Image (cartoon, helix red, strand yellow):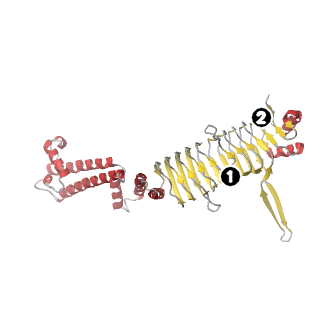
Amino acid sequence: MRAKFNELSDIQSFLEENEPSRISNNKNIDLRECTFGFNLDINVLLSSLNYKYGNFENLCFRNSIFEFPVHLSLKKQTFIYDEKDKYQDCIYSNSKIEFSIDFSNSHFLDKVKFNGIEFQEDIDFRNVVFENEVELSELKFKKYIRLFESTFKSDVHFANLEFNNKSIFFTNLNDRSKFEGNVYFFKVKFEEAKFWDFVFEKDVHFQNTIFNCPIFFNNAKFLGKTTFDSIETMGLTEFQNKVYFDNAVINNIEFNHLAFENAVSFNYAIIKEISINNVYCYKSPLSLVGTKIDKVKDEGTARFLKSEALKSNNAFLITELNAKEMNLHFKQLKWKDQFFDKLIFLLNKISNNFGQKWERGVLFIFLSWVLSFSLIILLRDGLGKTFIWLDKEYLREAMSYLWQFGSLDVLGKEFSLFDILVFILGKTLIVYGIYQTIAAFRKYGK
């Protein structure tokens, strides 16, 4: 039968009553398959256990249920007093836990907060379900921290801590940690960052994060907003090695105030929206082979990506990004202040979408021809009773107007200055449409 504790004294009584089976040579303390029905301050529990059993080696909570918040903070205070200057200061430092802790297969129903600890031995969160918010801050791990198969159903905060190369988020493709809430990494140091095939269901924030290792987001899915940025007054996000987003599916990603020391690869990634601000790539350009980008946030982002594509001679992506840049610039122009610039950009947009759509060029030619010829005939012959596009004589004149650049026969014997203006405007739009259609085809030959 599962034991249930409603206060700290219940744990003490339980261990005393079951000492042969739950206490092994004063080295291993076994609280597995228990239910904790109160707000558990593990610091108080550890003080009690240390007083009773001395320096034990392992504390096991495996398969337990925690119904209320769980808290562990061992921040150590050191007071410094200077008699000469009559000055007193307080220094905070992490306290050490020199035994392993096992929470594997446990279920946390409320908040979990660990703060100010240096773990000298393993800490195990394998196959754990966290129903509520989790905060792990100011932690150091000397040995293993195992997080694979765990499910975080709410927000997770990793702050001011160091993940060593024994920090395991998964061992194979079937036991990855699952993040169903927002994930925050603030001032975190990574010595190993293997997140391939991960699914981040909501927002992910990497702020002032230092990666001393290659970063693998291959085949990962970022379904919310993903942010890499720096608060420059508090340090920088640093990438000391290569970064891989190959084949990733990214909903929305932002890079702000960063520098990439090595190669960054987005090969064959699908990006719905991207924003880049104050970012530098020192050694290698972004690798964007086969990358699909639906939307860029602003002109600066489009210009940066186009510059990186130019460095890699990625012709197709260059034309695509150029179109996105021109579209964004067009939206910023004002008809009142920049009428002619806005008009030229509008014609470029509707005629071939800035070199992207040859189909628009063909349609532009057809509409310019039909509308200008119809208006010329209307000015020359009036409304009449004949639909000109079903009349053979008018069709013959229409074809002549389309193909013969200099012929004025379509104007008749008498015509006004306005008739000539309509004629010239129509011819100009037709020729412009032909040029834009050819220009759009050029992207296939670069």
Q: What label does residue 214 carry, if any?
A: none
- Tell me if residue 22 comes above or below residue 304 in the rendering: above
- Let me know if residue 350 appears in the view: no
Q: Is residue 446 left or right of residue 388?
A: right
Q: CA distance from mark 2 to mark 1?
A: 29 Å
Query: Which class describes the residues within 10 Å of circle 2: few (<14), some (14-19), or many (20+)?
Result: many
Relative image position of residue 106 (x, y in whole percent): 73, 37
Relative image position of residue 421 (x, y in whole percent): 21, 58
Name the quadrant of the C terminus: bottom left
Residue type at the position of mark 1 = Ala
Point 71% across, 45% down: residue: 145
Point 84% across, 35% down: residue: 22
Residue type at the position of mark 2 = Thr
Q: Secondary structure at mark 1?
A: strand
Of residues 9 and 358, which is closer to you in this image? 358
Of residues 138 and 214, which is closer to you in this image? 214
Give the mark nearer the N terminus: 2 vs 1: 2
Q: Secondary structure at mark 2?
A: strand
Query: Which class describes the residues within 10 Å of circle 1: few (<14), some (14-19), or many (20+)?
Result: many
Mark 1, residue position: 159
- The extreme bottom residue here reads 84
Mark 2, residue position: 35
Residues tagged 2 and 1 counted as in contact (Cβ below 8 A): no
